[in-house]
Image: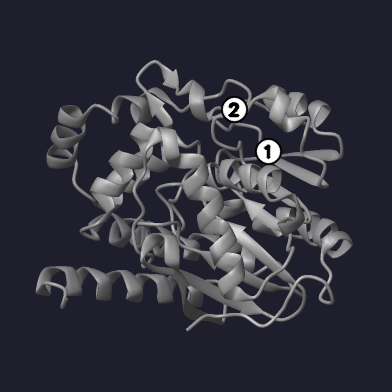
């Protein structure tokens, strides 16, 4: 089916904003589309660099190109940064609380199969951290290590800031969308909720606006947020508990923003104590500290990944186009 002209214009605007973001950080990335049979669709993946493979799992309400400030700092790896289902240029999934774990695990397994990756390390943020943890638990032989940047979603009783929880109310969300449509100022307010500032990052701000203007973004985000949280907090069915963290036997690195409103540094310390093989690094910033602190974070992540990544065991012939 041919997209409507308005949708085509939005996709073009998003693609251009994505390219500007990558150019800003000198990331030479190739766009690939990987078949995901369970979605009857495809996932969009940005592939950059050369060396052992690393998968980058961004959070909900974000897209792969937003990793660009960190991608610039990760030399010596082939980076596979994907748009989550229904985000950016990836086809949508159905988000429901009762099937969310199966959806995320199935998606990641088929993504790795399509890319020809056997057991790569993951870099993950927020919802990407939740998904990567479930995948590491349910498909232990497919994940070699995890770097969390920012508090993983719903870890150890954490939830989301009140404005995000309130946005799960359908009527209120529609009203807010009408009163505060996508714009640079609106994105700045979203960034502030996450403990970040985009004042000096016009390409990132423009990418957020272009992403929000994609016609599929509003319904996907509403369904995703409602599957994870409600006004009074996280949904118990999808919380990441201490019992589950204790079963994560892969090496883990936690890089935690000192002002992360999704989870305080004390939560990071608690997680590091529970996970059998974990190291914690506190950095400045909030829920996306690599946006403004990639120069400091990059070497920390690079050292950890060089200890974990192996080109001999982590790739095989893949299916992508």
- Residue corresponding to mark 1: 256
Task: Pick the quarter of the image with the N terminus.
Answer: bottom left
Q: Which mark is residue 263?
A: 2
In the image, residue 8 sits, relative to residue 191, either above or below, namely: below
> Is residue 59 visible to us here?
no
**Image quadrant where residue 213 sits:** bottom left
Mark 1 Cα shell of 10 Å, populated few (<14), some (14-19), many (≥20): many
**Image quadrant where residue 273 sits:** top right
State the residue in front, 290 or 229. Answer: 229
Relative side of 150 to 21, left or right = right
State the residue in front, 265 or 50. Answer: 50
> Is residue 190 visible to us here?
yes
The x, y position of residue 87, in whole percent, is: 37, 57
Cβ–Cβ below 8 Å for labels 2 and 1? Answer: yes
Pick out the residue farthest to the top: 232
Relative side of 167 to 259, left or right = left
**Image quadrant where residue 295 sits:** bottom right
The x, y position of residue 107, in whole percent, is: 51, 57
SS for callout 2: loop
Relative side of 300 to 46, left or right = right
* Mark 2 vs mark 1, CA separation in Å: 9 Å
């Amino acid at each position: 089916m041919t997209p409507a002209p308005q949708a085509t214009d939005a996709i073009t605007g998003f693609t251009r904003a994505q390219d500007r973001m990558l150019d800003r950080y000198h990331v030479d990335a190739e766009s690939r589309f990987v078949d995901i049979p369970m979605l009857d669709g495809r996932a969009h993946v940005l592939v950059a660099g050369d060396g052992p493979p690393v998968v980058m799992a961004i959070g909900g309400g974000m897209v792969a190109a937003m990793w660009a400030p960190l991608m610039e700092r990760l030399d010596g790896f082939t980076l596979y940064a994907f748009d989550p289902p229904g985000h950016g240029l990836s086809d949508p999934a159905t988000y429901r609380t009762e099937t969310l774990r199966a959806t995320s695990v199935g998606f990641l397994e088929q993504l790795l199969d399509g890319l020809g990756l056997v057991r790569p390390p993951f870099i993950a943020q927020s919802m990407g951290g939740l998904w990567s943890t479930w995948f590491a638990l349910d498909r232990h032989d497919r994940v070699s290590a995890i770097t969390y940047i920012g508090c993983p979603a719903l870890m150890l009783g954490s939830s989301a800031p009140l404005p995000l929880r309130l946005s799960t109310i359908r009527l209120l969300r529609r009203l807010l969308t009408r009163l505060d449509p996508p714009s640079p100022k609106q994105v700045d307010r979203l960034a502030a909720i996450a403990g970040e500032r985009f004042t000096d990052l016009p390409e990132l701000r423009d990418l957020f606006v272009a992403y929000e203007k994609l016609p599929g973004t509003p319904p996907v985000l509403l369904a995703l947020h409602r599957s994870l949280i409600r006004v009074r907090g996280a949904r118990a069915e999808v919380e990441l508990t201490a019992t589950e963290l204790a079963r994560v036997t892969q090496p883990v690195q936690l890089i935690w923003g000192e002002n992360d409103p999704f989870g305080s540094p004390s939560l990071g310390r608690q997680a590091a104590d529970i996970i059998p093989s974990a190291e914690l690094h506190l950095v400045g910033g909030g829920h996306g500290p690599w946006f403004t602190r990639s120069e400091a974070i990059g070497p920390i992540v690079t050292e950890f990944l060089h200890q974990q990544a192996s080109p001999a065991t982590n790739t095989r012939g893949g299916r992508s186009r």
